[in-house]
């Protein structure tokens, strides 16, 4: 007697189709609330309410995305989401945030030494809540999409090396849609963020570590130092340290993420986690695998 067709079993068997489902569903869970917030909610609110509402929406979107991811894993992979375990994850998230702030401070220290950053005092605390909202929603949702889905499922099929390259390249390509993006900016994102975040997950096998790094980096960049975050509007941080100089040094309109200094600092950190992954025996050397899991 032929087996009854099951969409879950079909998607579970074909890794690439499973990857597409994860990507599309998580992308919708991420983009939907943000589009609603930006187009239908924030324009009708008083300015003093926009930050808190954005923060609340960010938390709701993050919880929604994690819940959707858990449902997808349960349906298509029949397992618990151990990569989001909080016992190890919470300390790793804190370490990741601290590490990201320190890395960004190193970038600005170099830029300050090169006279590309000028101290002009303190900025404003007004934008901190909004920047925190941006950092949380991008950190949680983008790591679910690019590390928990693209990197993890690709690694299941092809091994760590190919997964790290593919997830980094896709992460860089997506950022080409941002304001002021250039090919150099896309390459920079792929190298510094794609490798760093992918290797951070590979070294710990816990998604909260790259989530913490992602949140800490975005908040430090926009909320503390007032720089442009991936092409966004700059100049609204806790510190007033404008950048001036050649684009290769400052990152130009895209912000410090397109700076040669950031590429060196973050890629070096990413390579450190690559080495740690290999030393811990967590680097999958299987190479190319069949598309059928």
Image (spheres, rainbow, N blue to C red):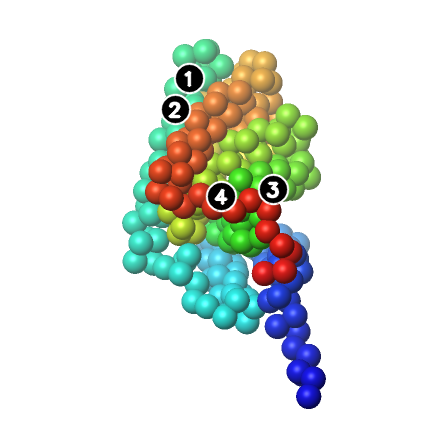
Of circles 3 and 2, the one toward us is 3
- Residue 83 appears left or right of 147: left
Indicate the quadrant containing the C terminus: top left, top right, bottom left or bottom right. Answer: bottom right
Q: Nearer the viewer, residue 233 or 206?
A: 206
Seen in the image, is 117 located left or right of residue 37?
A: left
Mark 1 or 3: the one toward you: 3
Q: How crowded is mark 2: few (under 14 residues within 10 Å), some or many (20 or more)?
A: some
User: For mark 3, does the 10 Å Cα neighbourhood hold few (<14), some (14 to 19), or many (20 or more) residues?
Assistant: many
| Sequence-wise first label, 4 or 2 | 2
Q: What element carries label 3?
A: helix
Q: Name the residue under label 3.
A: 166
Q: Give the SS element for disc 1.
A: helix
CA distance separating discs 3 and 2: 28 Å
The residue tagged 4 is 285
Task: Check disc 4: other Cα within 10 Å, few if <14, some if 14-19, many if 20+.
Answer: few
Report, in whole angstroms, how far the alpha carbon at label 1 lies from the one at label 4.
37 Å
Which badge, 3 or 2, is on the more N-terminal residue?
Answer: 2
Asked if residue 32 can be seen in this view, the reply is no
Q: Which residue is drawn at 60% across and 18% down?
A: 247
How much space separates mark 1 and mark 3, taking CA atoms? 30 Å
Is there a contact, CB below 8 Å, between mark 4 and mark 2? no
Residue indicated by mark 2: 106
Q: Name the residue carrying label 1.
A: 110
Residue 76 % position (x, y): 56, 68
Secondary structure of residue under mark 4: loop
> Which percent across, then down, holds residue 249?
54, 17
């Amino acid at each position: 007697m032929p087996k009854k067709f099951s969409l879950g079993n079909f998607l579970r068997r074909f890794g690439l189709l499973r990857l597409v489902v994860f990507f599309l569903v998580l992308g919708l869970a991420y983009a939907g609330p943000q589009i609603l917030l930006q187009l239908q909610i924030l324009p009708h609110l008083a300015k003093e309410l926009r930050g808190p509402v954005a923060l609340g929406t960010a938390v709701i979107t993050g919880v929604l995305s994690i819940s959707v991811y858990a449902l997808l894993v349960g349906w298509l992979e029949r397992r618990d989401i151990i990569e989001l375990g909080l016992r190890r994850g919470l300390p790793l998230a804190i370490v990741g945030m601290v590490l990201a702030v320190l890395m960004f401070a190193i970038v600005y220290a170099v830029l300050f030494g090169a006279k590309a950053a000028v101290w002009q005092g303190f900025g404003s605390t007004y934008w901190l809540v909004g920047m925190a909202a941006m950092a949380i929603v991008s950190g949680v949702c983008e790591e679910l999409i690019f590390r928990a889905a693209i990197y993890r499922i690709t690694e299941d099929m092809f091994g760590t090396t190919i997964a790290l390259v593919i997830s980094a390249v896709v992460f860089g390509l997506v950022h080409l849609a941002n304001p002021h993006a250039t090919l150099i900016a896309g390459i920079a994102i792929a190298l510094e963020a794609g490798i760093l975040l992918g290797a951070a997950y590979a070294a710990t096998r816990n998604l909260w570590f790259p989530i913490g790094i992602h949140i800490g980096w975005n908040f430090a960049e926009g909320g503390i130092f007032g720089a442009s975050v991936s092409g966004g509007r700059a100049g609204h941080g806790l510190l007033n340290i404008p950048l001036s100089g050649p684009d290769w040094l400052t990152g130009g309109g895209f912000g410090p993420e397109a700076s040669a200094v950031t590429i060196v600092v973050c890629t070096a950190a990413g390579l450190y986690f690559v080495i740690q992954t290999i030393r811990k025996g967590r680097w999958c050397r299987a190479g190319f695998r069949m598309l059928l899991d």
